Image (cartoon, helix red, strand yellow):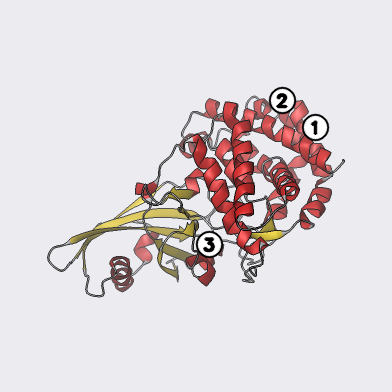
Amino acid sequence: MTTDIVESYVDYIDDATWQELVGALLRSENAEIISRHTEEIFVGVGAGTRLFRVTGTATGRRRPVHWKMIIKMLTLDQLNFQSISTDQGSWDYWKREWHVYQSPWQQQLAGPLVGARCVATGDLLAETDEELAWIAMEDLAALDHRPWPHGRFQEVARQLSIFNGEYLAGRSLPTDPWLSRDGLRGWTEEAGPLMEMLPTVPDHPAAGQIFPRDVVDDMIGLWDQREKLYEALDQLPRTLCHNDVFPRNLFVSGAGHPDHSVAIDWAFCGPAPVGQELTALVGASQAFFESRPERWDDLERDCLEGYAAGLRQVGWHGSDEILVGYVLSTALRFGVGAITPTLGLTLTTEHHELVERVFECSFDQFVANAAAFFQFQQHRIRQARALLGL
């Protein structure tokens, strides 16, 4: 076997394990690796995540066969504005996705939302005694059909609600201890240390364009009343949610299977109120340039309509709860909850290059989009307060 020498986390996986992985991928016990090549894929701002595409050849029945897979390495590395925990009960538990791919309920999803095919999982210690966990899965790059056509968002919202709706209709929620059970609160509370300095942000040359004084006032107002939003969300029906589905984390199964989509990045998975599943589909699509600002109202309406349609399809009816769950969750997650990463990327020039790589745009374009994004969230904050009579 020939192997490229790559100084990366992947090199800690031994040859015997690689042989097992390729055999499982090809569903052939007799396949032997001939060559292997690794390249790191830039994954953005996921705390502790390193992603690698591994390709190569292996023996086949008559001739060598080509193979490829994705290795997702989970580490405890983080940037200064990120959060990561070793506590299973924490919203930012570092190995949650590793557990998800070993869970029977995820691998047995019947659709239309399914998980990526997991070849195997493992954990190990690096030479520095750093604990690592890895997930080997199918390479879905060929199914990346971004940018999505407008109608795709509504269809994905319908698929998400069918996934959620099974639990609303009576299926028992998983009880795994590593599921995120209060993820929205955990994420939102990360903004606490920054709230005292938020009134000074409008004077900053970059961040001030995103947080003018009227937006800051609404953010502070919601922060002061956030417990009432948490309490209202706790009264809603709960279901199992992926909590991070948007175009970067979802792949269309192919032209021949338009009713199925493959979800990756299950790190935020856990029980949540009905409607909360839509927060990422709308908010992350806005923040990551998957939809243009002039279409954001239509995007939101399409997602709400698709989600309600899917729940009706599985026999659950409750449009008021959907709206309340979505609006309150998005005001918390992408209103005050987005303050920490946004200021982390804009208060200094340290992360300008990271912004350009993650969002695939110039820093100035990022700032302009973020300004439109928080104006949108300002309206959702006011809507949330109106729904609760605050």
Q: Which-is-in-front pick, marks 1 and 2?
A: 1
Q: Is residue 33 above or below residue 314?
A: below
Left or right of 229: which side holds 266? Answer: left
Q: Residues within 10 Å of mark 1 (few under 14, many from 20)?
A: some
Q: Is residue 251 above or below residue 56?
A: above
Counting from the top left corner in percent of width and height, residue 123 is at 46, 70
Secondary structure beneath label 2:
helix
Name the quadrant of the C terminus.
Answer: top right
Distance, label 3 to label 1, CA atoms, is 36 Å
Label whose residue precedes the other's in the sequence (3 or 1) = 3
Residue under numbered circle 3: 97
The kind of residue tagged 3 is Glu
Distance, label 1 to label 2, CA atoms, is 14 Å
Counting from the top left corner in percent of width and height, residue 228 is at 84, 49
Left or right of 115: which side holds 52? Answer: left
Residue under numbered circle 1: 217
Residue under numbered circle 2: 203
Q: Nearer the viewer, residue 24 or 84?
A: 24
The kind of residue tagged 2 is Asp
Left or right of 319: which side holds 171? Answer: left
Counting from the top left corner in percent of width and height, residue 105 is at 53, 69
Label whose residue precedes the other's in the sequence (1 or 2) = 2
